[in-house]
Image (spheres, helix red, strand yellow):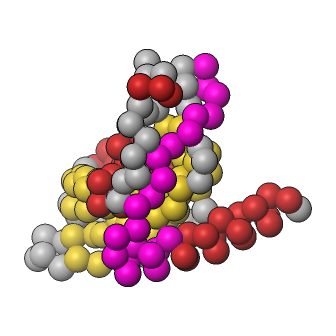
Amino acid sequence: MTQPIASRDMTARSPDHSQVTMTELVLPQHTNALGTAFGGQVLSWVDIAAGICAGRHARAVCVTASFDEVHFKLPIHHGDVINISGVVTWTGRTSMEVRVRVDREQIDGRRQRALEAFATFVCVDTDGRPQPIPPLELLTDEHRACHSQAEQRRARRLQNRAR
């Protein structure tokens, strides 16, 4: 159950506060006939990481509102370890953007970026109504740069939605 707004801490939080790191091993049940991970399975893991990240920031239940374009840069094979990292890059009144990166780690230790995705989450109460979230505290130049890029992506999303 989501806490009432009055009792939630709305203090600004840095992106580091919400950072999530998950590790998954790609097993046979996660792969297709070619031995590469099902895209839907990888996106499920991405959504879980992003949801945890959003919930940490809001300290409340957050739901997926959208994903930007997702492009798989490299195949992820059976036996690969994938490292999934998420961080809040932008906040609005009730929504936030979460950047999720997936790195493929092969048995020899080589790591390569397999995909990057941006998801929008909305904080909701138990009835599914949007709830305010804490602002993002931008402490470093990297935080500010990520936030600036996120504002540009948000403007494009809004423009596309208006069409």
> Hey, which residue is sitting farthest left in the picture?
108
Where is residue 35 shown, x and y percent of the image? 34, 61
Would residue 110 be visible to someone looking at this image? yes
Up-down relation of residue 117 to residue 40 (above or below): below
Residue 74, compared with residue 95, is above or below; it is below
Q: Which residues are magenta?
A: 127-147
Q: Position of residue 84 (x, y in %)?
A: 31, 59
The quadrant in which residue 151 appears is: bottom right
User: Which residue appears at 60% of the width and 47% of the height?
Assistant: 93
Q: Is residue 31 visible?
A: no
Residue 91 at x, y percent in the picture: 53, 56
Taking the view exactly as shown, the residue that stands out farthest to the right is 163
Quadrant in which residue 144 is drawn: bottom left
Front-most of 139 and 28? 139
Q: Residue at x 43, y 18 (%)?
A: 1
Q: Residue at x 35, y 65 (%)?
A: 102
Q: Looking at the picture, tell me which residue is in the foreground, 67 or 53.
A: 53
Q: Quadrant of the C terminus?
A: bottom right
Residue occupying the point 55% across, 65% down: 70
Q: Nearer the viewer, residue 29 or 55?
A: 55
Residue 131 lies in the magenta-colored region = yes
- How far across and down, in percent of the image, does residue 88 sit? 43, 58
